[in-house]
Structures are given as structure tokens and as C-alpha cells.
Amino acid sequence: MKRKKAKTGKNERAVPDYYARRAKKEHFPARSVYKLSEIQNKYRVLKPGGTVVDLGCAPGSWLRYAADVVGDSGCVIGIDPKGADIAISANMFIFQEDINELSFDAWRVIDRGVDAVLSDMAPATTGRKDVDAARSEQLCEMALYVADRALLTDGVFVCKIFQGGGFKAFSESVRVRFEKMKIYKPASCRKDSREIYIIGTGKKQEE
């Protein structure tokens, strides 16, 4: 007779996985850095000397990674109400603000034109998939608004979205704005996660 495995009651996400342990070893504040590194390796969304906006930059893993790629001649602008838990380098600017209530100073910097808009924003989850997806879509629409306003021609857009009822409509909104649109789920995403990334490359010139 087989004995049933006892339930520990521990949340599996509370146990550091390979990517979490690697992030700690490499001094990144979160495992999410490897999602961006996979996207970068596949699509080359970041370039040396580029200007990047990182929406939802807390705790700072994407911010630091992007700053390393663009280098001293580039610039990364992070936006998040929580700020970032990393050492700030000379090529980083952080606005500790809500994406829905950006200050004049933040827009003044962004409106100069950027080469890439990254969004790893995620809503506070409720456990209801439909509600969480709808909240994610709202954040994505705001990220796309920033991209519409700030991206230079041929610019790049990377946006995390929870798959739900509005996913197809949003992906089509990205498709019409860019020469190419890809849907990609990095291997470093958790298996039980409904998140996926929409990547637009080659921002079309406004008519």
C-alpha cells in the first residue's frame, strides 16, 4: 500500500528556486532579471547607448540589467511607486511615482524620446483570474500609452500581460504600431504563472 505524501502547507513560491538562488548569487534583487535577459538574448531589445524607460522597476533587477547593457553612454529611466532596492549608477534616473499620476518632471524626461519602453508591471493579485487579467490589461494600456508618446521611430516595446479576455485585443494594438510583434514566455517564468510578454520591434513612424 502506497503511503500518501504528507502536505507541508508551505507555499512553493516561498521556497527559492534555481532562478531565485542564482539572482541572490549574482546580486540581483529579484529572479525577474532572467526573464529580461532571455528576451534580450532572443530579440536584442536593448542596445549600447540607448535610452530606456523601465515601468514598474521595483525592486530594480530590470533596471540594473538594462543599465549594464546600454552602458555609460546610455540612460535608463525607472518608474515605480516603490523606487528600487539597488545602488543607483550615473546612467540611471528613478521617479518614485505611480504610472497613472506621473509628474511633469517625469514626462519632461520621457518626452525627449526613448529607444525602448519596458514594462514588467503587475497588479496586486486577488486570486480571481478574470479580475487579475483585467487589472493587468489596464497597466498594459498605460504602458502602451507611454510607448505611443515617447518611443522613437524603430523603437522597441516589451510588456508583461496576464492572459485573459483582453489579451488578443491588446496584442493586436501592439501589432498595428510595430513592424513586428512577438509573443514570448521566457523559460524563467514560473510554470503556474499566466504571465506572458508581448514584444513589439520597429516602432512605425507616425503619419
Image (spheres, rainbow, N blue to C red):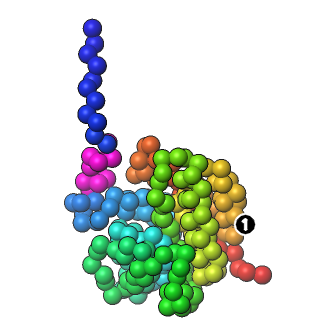
- Image coordinates for residue 25, horizontal then vertical, percent: 21, 60
Locate the N terminus by quadrant: top left
Lateral position of residue 158 relative to residue 38, left or right: right
Question: Viewed as shown, does residue 17 lie left or right of 175?
Answer: left
Q: Residue at x 69, y 70 (%)?
A: 177
- Image x and y of residue 37, in percent: 41, 62
The quarter of the picture where residue 34 lies is bottom left
User: How many residues crowd around disc 1 within 10 Å: few (fewer than 14), some, or many (20 or more)?
Assistant: few
Above or below: residue 130 compared with residue 67: above
Q: Residue furthest top?
A: 1
Can residue 37 be seen here? The reply is yes
Viewer-side residue, 194 vs 139: 139
What kind of secondary structure does the magenta stretch mostly adopt?
A: helix
Q: Nearer the viewer, residue 196 or 75?
A: 196
Q: Is residue 153 left or right of residue 35?
A: right
| Magenta-colored span | 12-22
- Give the residue at x 53% y 46%: 128
- Please say if 73 is above or below 141: below
Residue 76: say if magenta: no
Number of numbered discs:
1
Residue at figure coordinates x 57%, y 52% from the top left: 131
Q: Amino acid at mark 1?
A: Val
Which one is in front, 149 or 46? 149
The residue carrying mark 1 is 176
Q: Position of residue 85 (x, y in %)?
A: 29, 72
Q: Would you say 29 lies left or right of 105 here?
A: left
Q: Height in image: 128 above or below 90? A: above
